[in-house]
Amino acid sequence: MSKEILDEYGQNFRAFMAMAAQFDAKTAVTAKEDGEWSPAFVLHHVADAEMHFALRYFNALTIDKPPVIPFNEDEYPDVLNYAGRDWLNSLALIESIGNLVIVALSPISPTQWERLSAHPEAGEVSLSFLIGKARNHMQAHTEQLKNLL
């Protein structure tokens, strides 16, 4: 089952990258409506989330029952300077992390897929569970980008 989840993650990652490639220097930084995120803000958000998620996977593989540290994504646009960041850097980071995750996790064993982390709300969760959540996160933001075209 876990290899299938990683395959779906890869499919969703590639779909996200294809959707993001449709934006240019002007359309990436322009919100459709006032108060709505621009595609660049979506890219910054996904880049930040993918960093968090990758660390969770790698910790699960290398630390005995590591804590899953939650992050407050609502604070990120202001605190992490989304308005001043380069959307192309975020896009490159997403691509790099996505490729790294796929390459790093592809050869792991069924036992490694079941390594546990301690989630503050869900309790003990497997690596399979963690990547399953990320797979859905990427898919949701692909739809968000599609709606911003």
Image: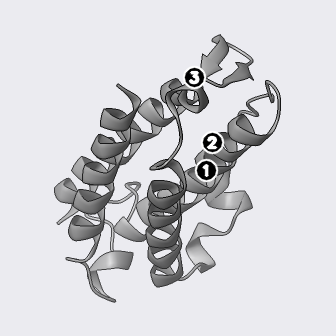
Confirm whether residue 71 shows in the render: no
Residue 30 drawn above or below residue 88: above
Q: Identify which amino acid the numbered label 2 is placed on.
A: Tyr
> CB under 8 Å between callouts 3 and 2?
no
Residue 126 drawn above or below residue 48: above
Secondary structure under tag 3 reads loop
Give the residue pinned by disc 1: 54
Q: Position of 59 compared to 102: left or right?
A: right
Residue 72 drawn above or below residue 38: above
> CB under 8 Å between callouts 1 and 2?
yes
Residue at position x 48%, y 36% in the image: 131
Confirm whether residue 69 shows in the render: yes
Choose between 10 and 30: the one closer to the eye. Answer: 10
Give the residue pinned by disc 3: 114
Q: Position of residue 40 (x, y in %)?
A: 42, 70
Q: Earlier in the sequence, mark 1 or mark 3?
A: 1
Q: Position of residue 43 (x, y in %)?
A: 44, 65
Give the residue pinned by disc 2: 57
Q: Identify which amino acid the numbered label 3 is placed on.
A: Glu
Residue 36 drawn above or below residue 69: below
Choose between 4 and 17: the one closer to the eye. Answer: 4
Q: Identify which amino acid the numbered label 1 is placed on.
A: Ala
- Per the model, the C-alpha gap separating discs 1 and 3 is 16 Å
